[in-house]
Amino acid sequence: MSSDAVSLSRFLARESEQRTLPTPALGTLILEMAFASKILSREIRRAALVGRLGLIGEKNVTGDAQKKLDVYSNEVVLEAFERSELVAAIVSEEMEELRTVGCSDTADYILSVDPLDGSSNTDVNGSVGTIFSFFRRTVGGACDDVEAELRDSAELVAAGYVMYGPSTVMVYTHGNGVNGFTLDYSIGAFLLSHENIRCPASGPYYSANLGYYHDWDSRIRNFADYLIERDPNGERPYSLRYSGAFVADLHRNLLEGGIYFYPADRNHPHGKLRLLYECAPMAFITDQAGGRASTGHARVLDIKPEALHQTTPLAIGSSDLVDLYDRFNVSSDG
């Protein structure tokens, strides 16, 4: 390892010194998430050896079958942040209700988290991830109604994801660009590996669950057909890359260009992905990297949450491709 390697803690300290980090507390929270992700990285790698693969026989609040690792991952995140004294409450995909964890004078943040995105991949050794974001409370102290605060006035101030693949990569933003860090297992530290990530304006990939193709609106089907048509200039067809893990698919598109879309369908008229702990965090990251995130009609970051597990249609990634997706959405013939 080079002596010039920059650790996540050192990078955050530098940002704090340069006053580009909104508050020192936010840096502490990002480091807390990094700590939790190190535990998850270790446990995901050895899950098959310690009996943590498979289902537990229940469904979470969103109707998805829970895996053993879903439950374990949620417990790891809760434990990490319940002791921080900086988080007033946690919203998780794995919990029906918001969990109030502490309302001291320092508990200025609300955490929203999908502890294990793409958990259906765990039993086949596929990529999975964690998605997280921090909302700043507009009031301090007593937690009279944190859920109402989240709906009415809390501001999204930082977001990130961790991808557990061939390596473990953590990407985050607090509104001052996007940076990625790779976990060096030999020293147990995240090191800067992807500085100032910029999403290409276009790219060769698209990610979508084509199993729902016949349940999509005709305009979305027209868009998908356009992507796979061969054109004389050789710019199409686009290559399908869909892993079943939102984190993995978006990570590729942020680095190499492309679009991920999960539109409304016949059985999910308001979309399937959750706003607070999937779409909004990833939209914030993508926006900071120069990309776009849209419902097909509106900017995702302009949606005000009305419920903890609210869903929304989503198209996210390279700005030119998301613009094109929006144009198909307002035109019946593309």
Image: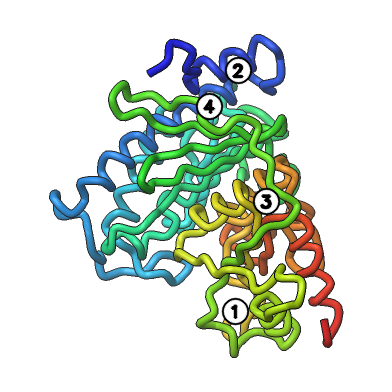
Q: Which residue is mark 4?
A: 86
Q: Secondary structure at mark 1?
A: loop
Mark pair 4, 3: CA separation: 24 Å
Tell me if label 1 and label 4 are in contact, CB under 8 Å: no
* Badge 2 or badge 1: first in the primary sequence: 2
Mark pair 2, 3: CA separation: 24 Å
Give the left or right position of residue 139, taking residue 262 as reference. right
Q: Secondary structure at mark 4?
A: loop
**Is residue 114 placed above or below 55 in the rendered structure?**
above
Q: Nearer the viewer, mark 2 or mark 3?
A: 3
- Quick one: 151 or 30, which is closer to the camera? 30
The residue lying at 15 percent from left, 54 percent from top is 51
Percent x, y of residue 143 = 59, 37
Mark pair 2, 1: CA separation: 41 Å
Q: Nearer the viewer, mark 4 or mark 3?
A: 3
Label 4: few (<14), some (14–19) or many (≥20) C-alpha neighbours in 10 Å: many
The residue lying at 36 percent from left, 65 percent from top is 120
- Quick one: 228 or 54, which is closer to the camera? 228
Given the image, on which type of amino acid does mark 3 rest?
Answer: Ala
Which mark, residue 283?
3
Q: Nearer the viewer, mark 4 or mark 2?
A: 2
